[in-house]
Amino acid sequence: MEKSLKTYLMIPLLLTLFLANTEVQADESLSVPQENPTSSDTSLATPASVSNRNLASVSTSFESNLDVEEIEVNELINSNMVSLSNEELTSQEIGSSVTTNLERTYDLSINTQVASQDKSVETTTEREEEPLAASVVANPLTVTQKTEMMTVSYQDNIPKDSELLVAVWSNKDNQDDIQWYNLQNGQANIPYTNHWEYGLYHFHAYFRQKVTGKMTFIRSEEVMLDQPQLETKITTTSQRSFDITISNVPGYFHALYVPIWSEVNGQDDLIWYEGQKQSNGTYKVSVDMDNHKSSTGLYHIHYYEGKPNGKKVFVGQAIYNQPVPKAPSITIKSNNDRTFEVTIRDIPQKYHKVFLPTWTSKNGQDDIKWYQPSKQEDGAYRVTIDLEHHQFETEGYQLHLYGESGDKKTFLGGVSHNQPKLETQTQVTKVSDDQFTVTVTNVPSYIDQVRIPTWNDKNGQDDIRWYIAKNQGNGTHSLTVNIRDHQYESGLYHIHVYGNAGRVENIFLNANTTYRVVTPKAETQIQALTDTSFEVTVKNIPSYINTILLPTWSSKGGQDDIKWYTGQKQKDGSYSLTVNSKDHNFDSGTYHVHIYGRTVEGRLLFLDDTKIEVKEISKPMAILSIQNVNHQKGTFDVIVSDIQSKIGVKEVQLPTWSETRGQDDIQWYIANKQENGTYKITVNASNHKYSSGKYHVHLYMVENNGRREFVGAQESDLNVTMSNLQVGSASQGNYQIVNKVIYLDAGHGGTDPGATYYGQQEKVLNLDMQNRLKSKLEALGYSVVLTRSDDQFVDLLPRSEKANQSNADLFISIHYNAATAPTVSGVETYYYQYYAEYPAKINKAYHNNAERLRLSASLASNIQSSVVGTSGAKNNGVKRNTFAVLRETTAPAVLLELGYLSNVEENRKIATVDYREKLANGIVKGITDYYKMNF
């Protein structure tokens, strides 16, 4: 049966690689099939390297891009033998060469067809080889394990025209130790040192024809090579050392490596020892605990065979429990509040010096100091430690003991210590409503300055002050705190105590003290005098306040009417104020009054707040009516007449929406004042999603004081249907429809900066002008559609496509100009000119439409005239061109060139906001004139 086996892909290559030579190069990567692999990991793999003991150089080069995973090889597989089918492949079919170090060229047995462009490879095989004769021996390939090696034997006949090769490799790591052996006279020895692992080994036998070099698979065998059973003897040589003797080590070991580490802290003390071979064949390793951080307890001992190629192979392990040696004793006695004495006994005689590195737990080991205790007559060691050397810390002292033997220091033990300290006491005494005294007692003797950080509980530590207390003698320090230094805050105060000792600053002493300051609470009274006025009176003012300020505002409009009043001081010490609503836009509703006091040094302090309700005065009035309802056009007029207001009307606002979908189509219209004094707007259904049915109109008036008042409401039915409504827009070719929608196209953008001169980019200026126009047009009731609202690149055709899909009445493309001659200046406006050599792509029906051209010319003329009038720029006139955005846009379209950036003088003007505002005002006026002239 035939099947494709990618895992046996490399066999045809092997058959060719060993042509006419008995030796194979060690670094040649070959792939050998295995019989009955034990796992997926033992299937075919490419070896990393092959020993060069008996093998000569073989190199391969492929002229085609051969993807070996696409080659199919037909193989016959049974339980005892893997053999190739009767196939013979030729080099003419693959176009590849194999060259040995003898410079002989042989044919690869692979049929390869290489495509000239995609280099894909198809491989086929042809059955031309005669099948091998059946073996007369049941199991001709045998492997015998010996002390130093394995012997592989072949007990059947070897064809006279062939030689027998056996590939040998261990099961682990993908054939990285594969070796090829020539079984001369049917036998070869396999030294264990030639291979890198223990466990399962594979033996594959091949016949190689001496003349053709053709390789034929014969048989495979597997052998389990057990790792040696080493024996360990451990002898304690001292309290801090032991010897390891390893026996039963095979003679073929090139080296024996012994990694050792203690159980403590993982493998942080791991050391790799090399066993020293003894005359009796054992290996010895001597271990000093000092090399393992003096760790006691469990030690791990592993054994690795050292291969000649440097590879280390695990062969066993042992453990050992090191007894805990008698530790030296360390005793500590405090002398006073700044020193303590350390006494050390039971130091082993091998150490001629001892060291005592000492530090506190705070901030790591930043205060570490290595002390060398002095040896006493009784054999003990003693040293005195002063807190001065450790930043006067009292807690968390760590003392480690090291013994020195020769030039080596060994850790012997450690102890911790907390130095007793005086408990500093703090007392607080009230002096007045705004002062208190802090007294600190029981201060340590080494403190030469007491610092007292103090702050109020409000707003964190924003008012913290570090005071220096005055030394009163006998360990007592004191100071007086004034709340003016703490923003005159009352409430809870926090008091901490720190001390300085020489160069060591801010030694913490105490933090358990708080004090609550109680100051007079201002009392505020408020009462109405008339419908539009009220009086505020403030009493119980703290003595350190000399001015009362009363900011007052109404709830309407936030604090837009806020006024800061100064209270008038009365004979009884109170302050009063009268407020009139006329000074607050006649606002009614809630008025807020806050009370602030100004101290002698000018600090403003919040004291109190109050509020009062003020009655509403008469509101503006007007008559709201709906006229000229046109169901055919989908429009109606809203008229506001008979306006009455005490302080005058600044603006008339008419929010309008259809009832169809709530207020999702609401538009806030600003009514235009007519010559007869009325205000008027025209509502178009196109601005309200062409909704049919009831429309709601509300009237709001903004009076001259800025207050906006609701005045009234009206409703109207507008029967809008597709059959009677002229739907669409100029952007769809209906030039009679007016939607008051304007499309603005900011030229260039993103990767296209446009003209760039004297630090200014056209794309930035175009976007700036677009935003100015949008704001102004929307304030006049127009809707605006944009090509882009930020710095992005949009190609020319998509700009027109977006415009043609909108309800826009007209299209305006915004640009600034440039010329090679630096003296050229001025503004010009373009509209479309037809050129046969530039045919329309998406606007074939309307690009040369007479009505579109007429309206475009009118728009261009109005804008050009207005821009020149408002800016004073040089008038370069209205021009025509076949620019893509003018050609492909259905609505009346113009392209504006608002000045030459290449002209240094004009560039400077364009750089100013004032000049760009003039340009924008001119464009807006041109647009509104266009609407008045044509609709």
Image: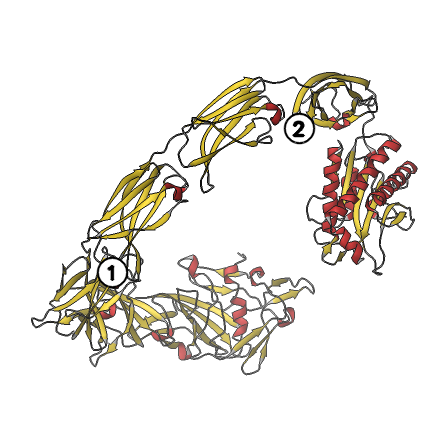
In the displayed orientation, state which residue is furthest to the bottom.
102
Which residue is disc 2 drawn over? 706
Q: Position of residue 434 (x, y in %)?
A: 35, 38
In which image quadrant can residue 922 be found?
A: top right
Image: 441 above or below 132: above
Q: Please state which amino acid type lies under the numbered disc 1.
A: Val
Rounded to the nearest angstrom, the CA distance separating label 2 from label 1 is 81 Å
Question: Observer-nearest residue: 141 or 91?
Answer: 91
Tell me the number on the disc at residue 264. Answer: 1
Q: Position of residue 824 (x, y in %)?
A: 85, 57
Task: Write the residue at 54% across / 56% down.
Answer: 3
User: What secondary structure is found at the residue carrying circle 2?
Assistant: loop
Q: Is residue 731 left or right of residue 264?
A: right
In which image quadrant can residue 501 be found?
A: bottom left
In the displayed orientation, state which residue is furthest to the left.
378
How is the structure coloured here?
secondary structure
Question: Observer-nearest residue: 673 or 190?
Answer: 673
User: Mark 2 vs mark 1: which is more N-terminal?
Assistant: 1
Graded by Cα atoms within 10 Å as few (under 14), some (14 to 19) or many (20 or more), the crowding at tag 2 reads some
- Whether residue 374 can be seen here: yes
- Whether residue 262 can be seen here: no
Q: Is residue 368 left or right of residue 877?
A: left
Q: Please state which amino acid type lies under the numbered disc 2.
A: Gly
